[in-house]
Amino acid sequence: MLKLIKTLSVAALLTVVSIAGAQAAGGGIELKSATWKHEGLFGTYDRAAAQRGLQVYQEVCAGCHSLRHVAFRTLADLGFSEAEIKALAKEATFVGGPDDDGEMFDRPGQPSDKFPSPFANEKAARASNGGAFPPDLSLIVKARGGFENYLYSLLIGYDDAPEGFDLPEGMNYNTFFSGHKIAMPAPLSEDGVEYSDGTPATVDQMAKDVTVFLAWTAEPKLEHRKNMGMKVILFLLLMSGLFYAVKRKIWAELH
Amino acid sequence: MSFEPKNPMLKWVETRLPITGMLHHALYEYPTPKNLSYWWTFGSLAGFMLVVQLITGIVLSMHYTAHVDLAFDSVEHIMRDVNYGWLLRYMHSNGASMFFIVVYLHIFRGLYYGSYKAPRELLWWLGLVIFLLMMATAFMGYVLPWGQMSFWGATVITNLFGAIPVVGDTIVTWLWGGFSVDNPTLNRFFSLHYLLPFVIVGVVILHIWALHTSGSNNPTGIEIKDKQDSIPFHPYYTVKDLFGLALFLIVFSAFLFYAPNWMGHPDNYIPANPLVTPAHIVPEWYFLPFYAILRAVPDKLGGVMLMFGAIAVLFALPWLDKSRIRSARFRPIYKQLFWIFLIDCVVLTYIGGQPAEEPFILVGRIATGYYFLHILVLLPLVGMFEKPKPLPASISADVLPKKSSDKEASNA
């Protein structure tokens, strides 16, 4: 038994090393990192940060990026009240219909609606962004290696291009974007938004807040998942002990 | 010997269809060597994982839409809107990995203790068939979410068949149902991904049938000689397996609840885009050793043949291994070679995940060469020249002497 555990842990370690090595391949620049309250075994989303992050998304990113997997009603998870959610949804306009005459009409958003997209389609988005396509942000935190730290680094990573760097017209220099040439202009600037809770809106603060918000949009069930995990694992530990005791007893009769 | 149910209903059924008798025989009476270690638990764990994959998969398919425009969104719908959909999906995706972990350990157990040798050759073959079916199923399953890795993985792997001379291109077109990986491909992959697990169930039944015909191998590698050597499967191994299952589920849960995307690839959260090729196309981790072998050869056809050859040679193992001794416990040289071979496979896994550049190419070639050297050359040679350690007289002779001397010690 002991030997089995030893061998298994060595095997597990080797596998982890070889897989982790496989995943790390391709990286390159060291990302800026921050502490995220939703990390760790018991981590939960920082509600205040996520709420501020929603504001950053709406006032800054939503001009170019969609958030098409996220429904307004799910904002309740971040501590928004039903009335607040209704009011937020109402600000958006959707095409409804057809009505009884077969006509389409504009209607205000409802909590069950998803966030509206700034552009009708990819072509329109590219036309407005110098040919580049601003990706949907619902899953962006899970869709890039580096995860939260990548998004955070990207948002604070704008800089002047170093001497001799060939930066084409309409492109911007970003330390953390692969190839350093990004079509997105630096989206955040000092006091770009005015936080209602009085938090100073520095670039770093806004970058962190919108990252927390987008981490939540990418993995909205994280808290439920960890909570359930703790219970399941405690239960399994109990069962292991029980089965082990029963096993000892049954096998003892054998000899 | 034959089973006589007491319940009149069961008796009525039994005389017409002896199914309870069969189950009774398989679970209760099945005489099992009394010395099986925990390495023998991975077989039943594999069976357990098959059931987990079937149940979660069937429920997931109730919410999934196999269409290039809807597949990605339907997976997100499962993750966000379906009750416990996130749990089902993470169970299924991590479950595939756990299934492979368990099966790999099961296979290496077989290699260490010579479980493939006569009279268990067919048992071994059926196991390899299950392994092949699992790979096909997992590969097609990974395509279903229709993310970037789904799409490009499917493109790369199906293109391999294009290397076959003369009919290659026709086969690829036929696999795709068109001239590129597209909606017809997704639809047929979904259909087959649903079908193959049931084929696996069928082969698993044959696998267990063959097992119960020749009996379990055991750490000594010698056969059961008399009643002393064996115990009924139930309750001894049912309870031992249950304990193993509980421990295994803790590991599974750790991934499932705390790192559900760790074994996945970030690119698969980007919807498939035929116009944008990801920087590195990497298959799921459980394919990496074979991917490394594929890329070890500069020639496409050669690579494909070597990759399939890597599994094909495993079928020949019962005849390549010339030693009549099963267990590595009594084979001093083979034992060392076994561990070197295991390390070689880990190296291949690592190389499979690396970009195709030096020094990875060279290391990959050496590791690939060693893989075949081990199976095709070393294994037959060792069997001829190795001097095995003396075998115990019987299974119980191997287990008991220590026990009785223990007892004497404590009595004294």
Image (cartoon, helix red, strand yellow):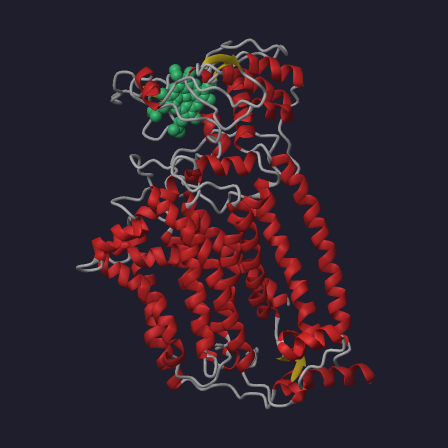
The residue closer to the viewer here, A12 or A238, is A238
Q: Position of residue A186 (x, y in %)?
A: 40, 16
Residue at 38% x, 58% y is B289
| Left or right side of A80 for A29 | left
Image position of B78 with respect to B35: above or below: above
Q: Quadrant of residue A236?
A: bottom right
Vertical placement of residue A117 versus B325, above or below: above
Q: Position of residue A117 (x, y in %)?
A: 44, 20
Q: Is residue B173 left or right of residue B380?
A: left
Query: Is residue A85 found left or right of A181 in the rendered image?
Result: right
Q: Nearer the viewer, residue B121 or B207?
A: B207
Residue B29 occupies quadrant: bottom right
Decide which of A147, B384 is in the foreground and name it.
Answer: A147
Task: Determine whether B331 is above or below B361 in the image.
Answer: below
Q: Picture coordinates of residue B391 (x, y %)?
A: 55, 87
Residue at the image point whose x is 50% and y is 72% from the top: B207
x%, y% of residue B128? 43, 68
Q: Residue furthest right?
A: B411
Visible residue check, residue A97: yes
Q: Can residue A186 be seen by looking at this rendering? A: no
Identify the image quadrant of the C terminus of chain B: bottom right
Tell me if A88 is positioned left or right of B365 in this view.
Answer: right
Q: Nearer the viewer, residue B402 or B171?
A: B171
Q: Which residue is located at x 54 percent, y 28 percent? A: A217
Residue at 52% from the left image edge and 35% from the top image edge? B77
Q: Please identify the quadrant where the N terminus of chain B is shown.
A: bottom right
Q: Is residue A193 above or below residue A115?
A: above
Residue ranking furthest to the left: B166
